[in-house]
């Protein structure tokens, strides 16, 4: 991509939501491309997200910006009403984000914003983009609840200049109805293709039979980790377990056939995925994009009570692209036997559709709505 020296003074804020690591990891290729275009990038976030992006971009400023501390229930049946109970707190967080951004624009001379699912990071004075793959929201409580959630989401999306959807526009896509609803927001919607921080390697040597990538909010991350740790000793093969805890320095006991790490950088994870025969992970959307890009076979276990992951898992199961199973009564040995029978995906779309969209955004005037 051509560098644009006339835009070298531009400063763009990149701010992913801190619910799990997925929003942050899919912003990594966007940040790399901005830097390639001589853009000054400021990252905003907190917790695991700030830790991860600091590791990936130690040369960039990472300023603290809290996310609403959503509490996920341990029981699937209480998910919807648990989310409804927390709605007032989420709305207050959106208001605080908007107020925070007004101050940050002045303090850091910000020219534009790329917000990944932070609904409060819009300002009428500068160009602001909102990233989401969930235009159509699945609440798990029927069409009426989905419609209400979508209307609320669209109210905030329409405050931005554009909405970028990390998926493919055609019939061959990753997120199905989530990214391709019948009704779209009023602002321009641009499909920017899959976003993955990983890159295909020319030559890899097999180091592990199975790579386990844990992610997502507690308590479900730990619950699934414990299920796996109990079953791994009874399965032949070499395991690498990535706990998805970039801030943690704690250690856990594991069997002799298992290597456990709290976190891997993008380069380390890239190598680990491609040097493993099979991946075991959640059906989070960012993970799916990584697996598609690397044409990797996987066992996907949706997080209980998260309708989005359950929909994605069912959507991909109908295409027989991955082996899908549930955390309830999870059987590691049985899942491995079933997964190895599936063929790897063969996605034909380019994985770099975001580059021309990002370049156009960089070259656009700084004025807002």
Image: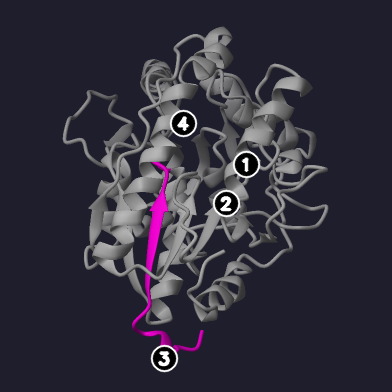
Q: Nearer the viewer, residue 357 or 349?
A: 357
Judged from the image, the secondary structure of the residue bearing numbered disc 1 is helix
Q: Give the CA separation, mark 3 to mark 1.
A: 35 Å
Rendered residue at 68%/48% (across/down): 344
Q: Nearer the viewer, residue 167 or 344?
A: 167
* Residues in magenta, as a range: 1-21
Q: Which residue is mark 4?
A: 91
Q: Which residue is mark 1?
A: 155
Q: Which residue is mark 3?
A: 6
Q: Quadrant of residue 233?
A: top left
The answer to whether residue 194 is magenta is no
Instruction: Give the x, y percent position of residue 209.
Output: 46, 40
Give residue 159's mark. Answer: 2
Q: Give the CA separation, mark 2 to mark 4.
A: 15 Å
Of the residues under marks 3 and 1, which one precedes in the sequence? Answer: 3
Instruction: Check the image and tell me how it is coloured.
Output: one colour
Q: Give the CA separation, mark 1 to mark 4.
A: 12 Å
- Image mark count: 4
């Amino acid at each position: 991509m051509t560098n644009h020296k006339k835009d070298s003074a531009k400063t763009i804020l990149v701010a992913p939501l801190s619910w799990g690591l997925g929003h942050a990891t899919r912003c990594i290729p966007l940040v790399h491309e901005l830097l390639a275009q001589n853009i000054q990038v400021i990252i905003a976030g907190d917790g695991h997200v700030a830790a991860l992006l600091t590791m990936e971009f130690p040369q960039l400023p990472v300023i603290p910006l809290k996310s609403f501390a959503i509490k996920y229930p341990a029981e699937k049946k209480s998910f919807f009403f648990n989310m409804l109970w927390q709605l007032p707190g989420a709305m207050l967080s959106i208001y605080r984000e908007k107020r925070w951004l007004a101050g940050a624009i002045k303090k850091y001379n910000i020219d534009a914003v790329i917000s990944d699912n932070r609904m409060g990071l819009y300002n009428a004075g500068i160009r602001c983009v909102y990233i989401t793959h969930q235009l159509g929201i699945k609440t798990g409580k029927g069409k009426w609840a989905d419609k209400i959630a979508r209307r609320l989401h669209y109210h905030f999306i329409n405050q931005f200049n554009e909405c970028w959807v990390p998926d493919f526009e055609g019939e061959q896509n990753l997120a199905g109805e989530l990214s391709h609803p019948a009704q779209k927001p009023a602002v321009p919607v641009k499909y920017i293709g899959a976003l993955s921080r990983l890159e295909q390697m020319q030559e890899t040597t097999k180091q592990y039979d199975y790579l386990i990538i844990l992610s997502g909010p507690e308590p479900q991350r730990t619950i699934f980790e414990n299920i796996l740790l109990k079953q791994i000793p009874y399965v032949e093969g070499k395991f690498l377990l990535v706990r998805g805890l970039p801030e943690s320095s704690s250690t856990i006991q594991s069997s002799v056939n298992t290597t456990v790490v709290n976190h891997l950088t993008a380069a380390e994870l890239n190598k680990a995925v491609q040097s493993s025969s099979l991946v075991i992970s959640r059906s989070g959307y960012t993970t799916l994009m990584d697996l598609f890009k690397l044409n990797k076979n996987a066992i996907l276990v949706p997080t209980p009570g998260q309708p989005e992951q359950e929909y994605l898992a069912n959507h991909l199961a109908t295409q027989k692209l991955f082996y899908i199973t549930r955390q309830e009564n999870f059987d590691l040995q049985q899942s491995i036997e079933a997964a190895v029978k599936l063929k790897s995906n063969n996605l034909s779309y380019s994985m770099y559709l975001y580059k021309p969209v990002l370049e156009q955004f960089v070259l656009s005037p700084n004025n807002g709505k």
